[in-house]
């Protein structure tokens, strides 16, 4: 039996911070798992280095399900983003190893591909409606069949989803940028710019929009109703989801499809949302929801309730996460869509991924395992650089959901 002989935590910042776990076995096979938690990276690195790595040495890398429960139940303290991201990293690395040992891509281990390509959506944005329309045209030219649209809101500087410089969701300085939010200004602006997108480009592509947890259920229902004629693919994260039953109110107010899940860590965060059909798409991620093993469980539960998948895939998830998501997306019958933001050239110097984009879809690599390698020498050239996600404040100065 092969055993785990080494588990190394690699922290690197090629333009933005990433934490990666590399597990190596006594047979010399190694696998990668993403352990990046944007803005709290070192907490996961410590959880892994100080608490999890000593538990891995000497264990059988083939027993993925057992390892998941050993780390989840064995810690006694359950759930939470730090714990679940660490478990995800171990789980993902073990699937990568299992694929390499079997000589199969991970999608074959998961039952084989149910589709050829994975439909993805890109991010169009602008600091004005005109800029947003130009960006939509760019994505259409690139062949995207699904596009998320966000534009700056006059009166709410630093509006969510609009690129600043080249990096997405950065911190401007060593402390969180504080952005101003006005629900009134947003509710006036968003329907107008989304209508302009449909007026200019028609309906032959999927249009998505992310509310980023900023509305109350009443406001979200109202917005969804106003957007119905635009036939959105989804309205994302209309309101925070700690109170799962609050989505019933949004659901009753509008037929605009609802997606939620990027901050979820476990199946229990979405159990009611799924089993009571309060959402249309579950948007959890491999890295923050316990790895391939646990996300598959969430997607399988969703299938029973006519809820489709919509994996989160922003650039603060590393190419290892994206690749793992693509392998899983390829296999699940209830697949909906995958978020895709191309990683920038610096990130690609460190992570060599072999998925490919064609005509609005991503194709996972057919190489054994996940098909991503990390260049540790390149990674070492980019030391950790502490950064925070922004914080939102209402116009009266009080803190709002970001
Ligand atoms: O780290 C937070 C980002 O991943 C998040 O703000 C991106 O909402 C997001 C999205 O849908 O991509
Ligand atoms: Mg989002």
Image (spheres, rainbow, N blue to C red):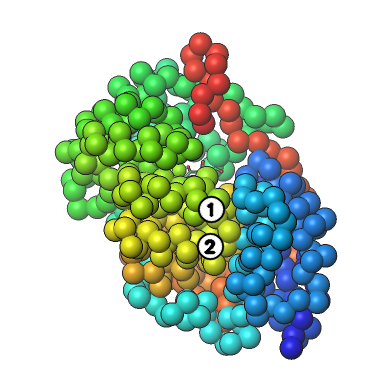
Between discs 2 and 1, the one toward the N terminus: 1
Q: Quadrant of residue 293?
A: bottom right
Q: What residue appears at the point 58 percent right and 28 percent down from the top-left corner?
A: 391
**Label 2, residues with CA under 10 Å away: few <14, some 14-19, many ≥20:** many
Q: CA distance from mark 2 to mark 1?
A: 7 Å
Q: How far across and how far down the image is residue 224, in percent?
A: 26, 34
Camera-nearest residue between 310 and 239? 239
In the picture provided, is 258 more to the left or to the right than 27? left
Residue 55 visible in the shown view: yes
Which structural element holds mark 1?
loop
Q: Determine which of the numbered discs, if any, sits on residue 401 in the image.
A: none
**Label 1, residues with CA under 10 Å away: few <14, some 14-19, many ≥20:** many
Classify mark 2 as within 8 Å of ligand 1 or not, answering yes or no.
no
Camera-nearest residue between 124 and 328? 328
Q: Determine which of the numbered discs, if any, sits on residue 266 in the image.
A: 1
Q: What residue appears at the point 65 percent right and 80 percent down from the top-left corner?
A: 62
Q: What residue appears at the point 32 percent right and 45 percent down from the top-left corner?
A: 278
The answer to whether the residues at label 2 and label 1 have Cβ atoms under 8 Å apart is: yes
Which structural element holds mark 2?
helix
Q: Quadrant of residue 75?
A: bottom right
Name, please, the residue furthest toward the top.
Answer: 396
Q: How far across and how far down the image is residue 324, in percent?
A: 53, 66
In the picture provided, is 134 more to the left or to the right than 21? left
Residue 351 visible in the shown view: no
Camera-nearest residue between 184 and 146? 184
Q: Quadrant of the N terminus?
A: bottom right
Q: How far across and how far down the image is residue 350, in percent?
A: 67, 62
Instruction: Determine whether 382 is above or below 182 in the image.
Output: below
Q: Quadrant of ligand 2?
A: top left
Q: According to the image, label 2 marks what residue?
A: 294
């Amino acid at each position: 039996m092969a055993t785990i002989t080494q588990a190394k935590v690699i922290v690197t910042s090629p333009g933005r911070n990433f934490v990666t776990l590399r597990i190596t076995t006594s047979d010399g096979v190694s696998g990668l798992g993403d352990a990046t938690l944007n803005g709290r990276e070192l907490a996961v690195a410590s959880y892994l280095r100080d608490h999890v790595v000593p538990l891995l040495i000497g264990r059988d890398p083939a027993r993925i399900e057992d390892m998941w429960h050993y780390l989840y139940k064995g810690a006694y303290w359950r759930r939470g983003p730090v714990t679940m991201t660490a478990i995800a990293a171990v789980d993902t690395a073990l699937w990568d190893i299992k694929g390499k040992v079997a000589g199969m891509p991970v999608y074959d281990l998961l039952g084989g591909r149910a589709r050829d390509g994975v439909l993805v959506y890109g991010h169009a944005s602008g600091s004005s409606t005109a800029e947003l329309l130009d960006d939509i045209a760019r994505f259409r030219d690139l062949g995207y069949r699904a596009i998320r649209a966000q534009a700056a809101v006059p009166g709410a500087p630093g509006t969510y989803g609009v690129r600043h410089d080249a990096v997405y969701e950065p911190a401007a300085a060593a402390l969180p940028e504080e952005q101003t939010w006005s629900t009134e200004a947003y509710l006036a602006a968003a329907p107008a710019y989304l209508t302009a997108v449909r007026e200019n480009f028609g309906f032959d592509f999927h249009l998505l929009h992310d509310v980023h947890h900023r509305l109350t259920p009443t406001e979200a229902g109202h917005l969804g109703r106003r957007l119905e004629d635009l036939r959105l693919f989804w309205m994302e994260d209309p309101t925070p989801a700690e109170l799962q039953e609050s989505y019933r109110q949004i659901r009753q107010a509008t037929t605009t499809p609802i997606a939620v899940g990027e901050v979820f860590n476990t199946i229990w965060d979405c159990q009611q949302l799924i089993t009571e059909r309060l959402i249309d798409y579950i948007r959890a991620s491999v890295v923050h929801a316990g790895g391939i093993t646990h996300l598959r469980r969430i997607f399988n539960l969703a299938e029973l309730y006519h809820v489709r998948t919509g994996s989160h895939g922003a650039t603060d998830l590393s190419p290892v996460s994206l690749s793992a998501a693509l392998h899983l997306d390829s296999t699940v019958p209830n697949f909906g869509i995958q978020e895709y933001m191309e990683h920038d050239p610096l990130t690609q110097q460190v992570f060599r991924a072999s998925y490919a984009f064609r005509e609005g879809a991503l194709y996972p690599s057919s190489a054994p395992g996940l098909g991503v390698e990390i260049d540790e020498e390149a990674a070492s050239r980019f030391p950790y650089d502490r950064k925070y996600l922004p914080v939102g404040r209402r116009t009266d100065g009080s803190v709002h959901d970001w």
